[in-house]
Image (cartoon, helix red, strand yellow):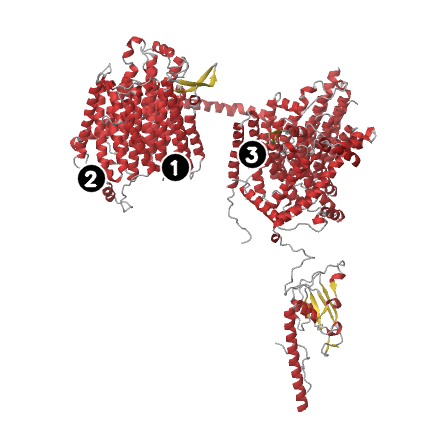
Amino acid sequence: MTALAYNSLHHASPQAADQIFLIVQHWIVSHAPAGLQSLLAILLSVVAIVGGFGLLFAITTILERKGLGRIQNRYGPNRVGFFGSLQPIADAIKSLTKEDIVPQTADKLVHLLAPILLVLAAFSVYAVLPVGRNMVLVNLDAGVLFFFAIGSVTEVAVFMAGWSSRNKYSLLGAMRAIAQMISYEVPLILSSLTVIMATGSLSTVTIVEKQAGFSRILPHWFLFTPWGFAGFVLFMIAATAESNRSPFDLPEGESEIIAGYYIEYSGFKFALFFLGEYLGMFAISGLAITLFLGGWNAPLPFLTWVPSYLWFFAKLLTLIVAFIWVRGTLPRLRMDQLMNFAWKFMLPMALLNLITAAVWHFMPSGPVRWLVSIVLVVVPYTLLGRNQMHKSHLEKRVYRFAE
Amino acid sequence: MTPLSSCLMLSALLFSVGFAGVLMRRNAILILIGIELMLNAANLNFIAFWRYGSAPEALTGVMFVIFSIGVAAAEAAVGLALIISIYRHRKTTQIDRINSMRG
Amino acid sequence: MLGEGIAKGLIETARNFLGSYVNKDRLTTVQYPEQRLPQAEATRDFPFLVYDGEDWQAGLRCVGCQICEKECPPKCIFIEKSTDKKPDAVGKPQFYPAVFNIDISVCMSCQICVEVCPFDAIKMDTAFELSTVDRFGGLLWDKARLAKPNQHYHHVHPTEAAEVDGRLAEERAKADAKAKAAAEAKTSAPPPAAPPAAPPANSGVSSTS
Amino acid sequence: MTWIVRNLWLIPALPALAAGLTALAKRHQRRYSAALAIGAMGLSFLLSLCAFSQVMLAITHGQPSRQVVNFPWFEFGNQWLKLGWMLDPLTAIMLVMVTFVGLLIFIYSTGYMAHDDNFTRFFCFLSLFAAAMLGVIIANSLLLLFMCWELVGLTSYLLIGFWYHKPSAAAAAKKAFITTRIGDLAFLVGMLWLFSQAGTLLFYDQGAGCLEHSALTAMVAHLTGIGMAASTGIALLIFAGAVGKSGQVPLHVWLPDAMEGPTPVSALIHAATMVAAGVFLVARVYPLMAAHSDAASALSATTALQVVTWIGAITAVFAALIAVAQNDIKRILAYSTVSQLGYMMMGLGVGGVAVGMFHLITHAFFKSLLFMGAGSVIHGCHEEQDIRRMGGLSKLMPVTFATYAVGMLALCGFPLFFSGFWSKDAILHAAMGWSISRIPFYLGSLGALLTAFYMTRQVYYVFFGTSRLASHHEATPAAHTAPPTPHESPSSMTFPLVLLASCAILLGAVGTPAWPWFDSFLSGEAPIFAFAGFLEHGILPVMLTSTLIVFLGLALGWWFYGRQPILSADLPDALEQLQPGIFRVLQNKFYVDELYEHTVIRWNSALATFSDWLDRWVWNGVVMTVSNLVLGLSWLARSTDTYLVNTSFDEGCNTVTTSGKLLARLQSGRTQSYLRLVGIAFAALVLVLIWSARS
Amino acid sequence: MLFTIFAALTIAGAVAAISLRNLVHSVLSLILAFAGLAAVYLLLGAQFIGFAQILVYVGAVAILIVFTILLTRNDGTFGTSSQASWNLGALIVIAVFGTLAWTIHSSAALQHALPPQPEATMQQIGTALMVRFALPLEVIGLLLTAALIGAATIALHEKQERP
């Protein structure tokens, strides 16, 4: 296997470096009996996805802890391995060896199934993410729809976890999480609809291919259109809420409901939840890359020789760093602020952005189109933003029992 | 059994199970679940006849199911809202206690 | 403009992030096992029993009066008083604690035992690295584990120990003078009835205050 | 077609946009709204200048000076209703005038309204007004013109009633709105008649418009029942609209009352632009007014033009007479406006478009100048409007005085140097040469005399003598102890005054008999410069006559009011001492308001009382009789019912109830029972269907 | 083979959904039934419908039912009917199923040969929705809006006047 990899590299075509994983897969599959070949190919891809993103999860945990530490002027983990680089392994060993506590009154079966379902849903979403040229598990005709459909299963898993624990806090956390996910799913889907409208396809592969090419130095990513930029920002905000990350981490708000729906989980099941959350975040970032950031396409014309999957992962890491950065910066929202933001800012913005995309599509290209689209984005942003900002006239708080 | 008839049998079974839920349980939510199952059985019929029917390129079956899913979503929302409202007034979701419309 | 504050916050955290690599003064964390902060002199955590001289068995100041046991709020001290008397450091016969146990997993470091001890026999220690694999036995300290020499007291709380030693020496001198005067009186005059409440020489109860 | 013609709609659209944006502004965003309104108006002014130069270019190059853009609005039946705009010399000159005066008044308003709470609302209305007025000007369709016309009326209503908390302002607004509506109704009827005759409301449409030859000949040829040509009827109806809007007799009553609005409004709407819209309308449909049945009688005036002339002449004198005896500074100017509008109408009637329009333009400048000067005076005197309580302001407000004097001399028609002289002279000259009668000429001369007289009176009262403001304030036991001294207004108010004053002087130059640029511009020809114009028949005598008249008026004014300074506010007017009876009649505006009160309104209420009586006694009596009859019948029926029908019916009902109770058991209220039935029925139905299909 | 598995899954989920005592368990089994049905749709080549089924039924309807269950408390009585009506209901259900099954079994319409897999790409569905079925689409949008507002109005807390 290594020999072949070396060989194809030695053949020195950039194509080979780009397609190295496919070549390896073909090579392995060709040695299997004919009846099992297709099954083996799928199995290999699944293994690659699970392994690759599992590794990314490990890297992200240490990255997040180090990054947050530095943001707060701390060192972060620096004991295990070189500068703490082996911390994830230590964490894994710890969580695997910890005692698995299930509350006595808990619904045992559901309690067990919840984390498994979450991780399964999170992993199956990767089936439609093109991580490189020709590197997608299944090129579904309705890929984006598949992504959102499977993504909505997460809500069921969260509910199962919250309900089966027989704990008020976990149920409250689950309810919060579901309400939040449903609310933010609307702007999430609406903002990705712009791209679907522009490409006329739900297939992730087609969407990425439509973003190939450059005009002079600017790549044809949808990020570089007014509606695409607005859509990307809206998408990322909604994605932050969907993956329950700060500043939208109310479902696990420690100060109010301890840890939300996974209070009663410990040991490996807790690790599974952790994994599921992070996988969800990667997946939705991957979708953002696919929809707005040109997928695995290179950002500059003279960089196309770099293998495509490297670009994908570079973009993914950038987004992850952005997530960590935001988490280190912003405080947690209040529930009413969260809902107001979703329904009074995100939803109208996403709808108007849809109109902007349509206008962009039907206007002849030129500066006028840019101007009109920018106005269509900026003006509602300003008005809605102002509306959001001047609403904070809270009444004086009345203490009924404390005085 | 041809594929079509097996599909139809599945649909009939699903319908009957849903119908049993509607007839044999008293909880309004369960009755709603039974209705959802019956609706799904109908949807399955549409898809089966589209798949094995005479003019699949017209997509009529698929379209019908799309609209049916939309209607089902609306129906579920309104139905559940009604259940909540009834519960708030009568403190029960048992369907046979909600009989103020009797003659 | 919506988002302005967010941008400001992001810039601030980015400055923190980068600054922590450039400017070491930002990182206030002490790398503990390798580096330590100096302890303040008033640091305290768990009590120990002071003994004078070399032999801890003989030099223990504690007389088993059980005041600390009664005063301890979480009731972590357990004392069994001896039935016999042994000479103490100055050779005066005293009761002594047959058993003196402190459960430091219960102790809350309140220092009340130290405040109430009339004999300056129990003092607070500063040792804190006390982890043990035995949750129950390892944290129940007996007399042998608790006994520390007066030098140790001087080592951990020098000022306080000097003050205590000075006071004790003064009392002892006073008691000695009194004894000498009594002896002189005895030689000059016929002995009176046995002095009823002759205070023990190194007891501070009657002489102090 | 050039860019400016295609985008002429921008000129009204910009102020409309500004109005919309200002309407969204918050109350405290004063600078924003003012900047928006002035900016939009400035842009419109620049665009108007473009349009003007475009027309100038077209004329110098000998191209057709009228360009139209028409577009379909909506379809009804199988024809399209079209709207459109046009650019011709008339439009161009009006555009420049309206935008320029409007711009200056906007700037002036920032100073005048600086302390008003509803500053933003004011600018919103002003912008909306400007948009509507510009719409009137560029309209190439009588319908579009009418829509904008009504919008103008609406904004006029809103602005007159701007201080609606004052009952007099609210009443004045209503009065203005309702009075002009009377004229507008006639206008609407005329418009409908025109549409039925011509089949289009576009003025010009490549030969198919209603003001073009084919339509006009058709309308002239069509005679109505009373032997009048359709064109005359339509023209008179449309003129009725103009009468309402331009405050001609007998619908002039609203205009003086409209002075309740803020002074910039009076200057913009009720002196320079809106009231002139009536004149503009007549000028716009002039081809219709002047349409003759045959070419031979082309020189004599048509019936419609005769009516216009007479109404104008009567108004000119009538209003001037009333103005003599008024004491409110703005009211005098208002009556003066009515009078001058009469002049314009007369000019249109006797001399054609150019004569009337020339006076319109010059009048717009000096009358808005006078109004703004009056506003400055009022502002300086702390909202005092009674001229008897002013006096001696020439030293305290030098800039205002100087500009006001310029405006006054222009209005009087002081010879040679002031624009009013030339425009008024053109009208008088045309009137003298009118073929029907000389009377309008004499009326016009009388009006000129009166104008000079009352303006002199006003100026003496306001600016000369001693200040009577303080004495007045001491007389009233008011709370404010220190009597406020009049002061000069801020530069944002004086700057437009100076600019307008210079225009009031210079503008006369474009219409002298020697260089009739204005006349030729409107008719689309290149102007010729020749001093020989003065020697043309009848010009010099008329000039001399009018000069004499003006000097006579000024002298009379000086004689009555300037000889000795007016000492007290409470002294009777000099004229009143001489002829108290006439003065009182004049002061009460010939009792026109009272006449209306006693005739139209009284009749109306009497009719209402009569109807009420009729209703109460006659019809009600009939109804009561019938109802009593019915009551009797029903009593009979009831007895039959109770004792005959009921017993048998009760029996039947009981039977039905019993059987109903039996049936009601089926309706258990339990959903599942129903569903069970549905299930059974379903199974049975399928079985029956299958069996029936088998057999 | 796959069809049998998914069909069995669906039926098992459905039966569990209507027979389990715990309502939340019922809903979770209902989700299983929905998912199985979605798989059947995918097998039948209706990709869009399959995913829409998951998105709507699993992601929305089931969650809605769950919320309703949590908002209404079960009042302790077990939700089956009395024995007699249970028997009657079972009888009717069996009758209905028997009729259906027999009809399907004896139908002549089933003797077709298996037609080729029809095409139902996203593009086609979208075109059909926007062109041929534009009016129904509008109507369904209106219906959903009305249902949304109606449901919100019905479930809204009324101002209760307590004595």
Q: Which mark is residue D568?
A: 2
Q: Residue D461 location, x and y as percent? A: 22, 35
Q: How many marks?
A: 3
Tell me the residue that label 3 is attached to. Answer: A349
Task: Indicate the quadrant containing the C terminus of chain D: top left, top right, bottom left or bottom right.
Answer: top right
Under circle 3, the secondary element is helix
Q: CA distance from mark 3 to mark 1?
A: 33 Å
Q: Do we see residue D611 in this rendering?
A: no
Judged left or right of residue C19, residue D504 is left
Q: Quadrant of residue D579?
A: top left
Residue at mark 1: chain: D
The mark that comes first in sequence, 2 or 1, is 1
Q: Residue D465 location, x and y as percent? A: 20, 38
Q: Residue at 76% across / 48% down in the picture?
A: A97
Kind of residue at disc 2: Ser
Q: Which mark is residue D119?
A: 1
- Mark 3 neighbour class, 10 Å CA radius: few under 14, some 14 to 19, many 20 or more: many
Q: Residue at 29% across / 27% down in the picture?
A: D506
* Of labels 2 and 1, the one closer to you: 1
